[in-house]
Image: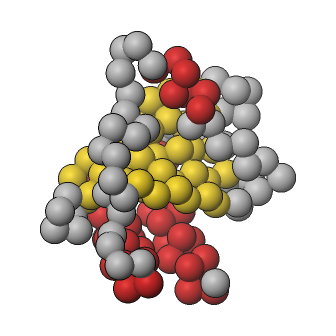
Amino acid sequence: MTENMDLMGNIAKAVVTSSKMQAIDWEEISIICEIDDHGKMNGVYGYAYGSDGVYQAVVPRIRELAEPIEIYRAWLQGDAAQGFKKILFQFNKRSGKVNADFEYDDPSRWQITPSNVEHMIEALRPNLGG
C-alpha cells in the first residue's frame, strides 16, 4: 500500500508543479490520461475545480505527467496481468487526498462530447475535501 501511495503522490506532485496548473487557481482536479498500446501516455485532459465550485477545462503538458503515469502503470501491470488504457486521477490540494480509477477496455469511458459535457464535468468532480 505504501508503494501505491508513493506512486500516486508522484503523480500529484507532477500535477501541482505542472507549469499550466500553476498558472490557474484550483483546489481539486480530475485529470484523464490516455495510454497507447505501448504503455506511453498519448493524451491528457480534465477539469480544475475552484473552492467556489467554478470549474475550468485543463490540459496539462503530457511531458510533465508522462513519467509518473507510465511508472505507475508499469507497477500496476506487474500485479494485474494487463495495463490500463486510461487513468482518472483526482487530487485535492487542501486535503491532500487522492483517488484513481482505471479503464482497461472501454476507450470511450470519460470521453467528453458536446452532448455529455455538462454531465461529465459534474461526474468527474472529485469531492475529496477534508
Q: Nearer the viewer, residue 81 or 20?
A: 81
* Relative to 123, 76 lies left or right: left
The quadrant of the rendering that contains the N terminus is bottom right
Residue 106 visible in the displayed image: yes
* Residue 50 image point, x, y percent: 65, 33
Give residue 35's quadrant in the image: bottom left
Q: Nearer the viewer, residue 85 or 29?
A: 85
The residue at 64%/60% (across/down) is 98
Q: Nearer the viewer, residue 72 or 102?
A: 102
The residue at 23%/68% (across/down) is 39
* Relative to 116, 8 lies left or right: right
* Relative to 127, 121 lies left or right: left
* Residue 4 image point, x, y percent: 56, 79
The residue at 54%/70% (across/down) is 8
Extreme residue toward the left, this view: 38
Residue 60 visible in the displayed image: no
The residue at 36%/58% (across/down) is 104
* Relative to 28, 19 lies left or right: left
Identify the coloring.
secondary structure
* Residue 108 image point, x, y percent: 33, 38
Give residue 67's quadrant in the image: bottom left
Extreme residue toward the top, this view: 115
Number of labels in the image equals 0
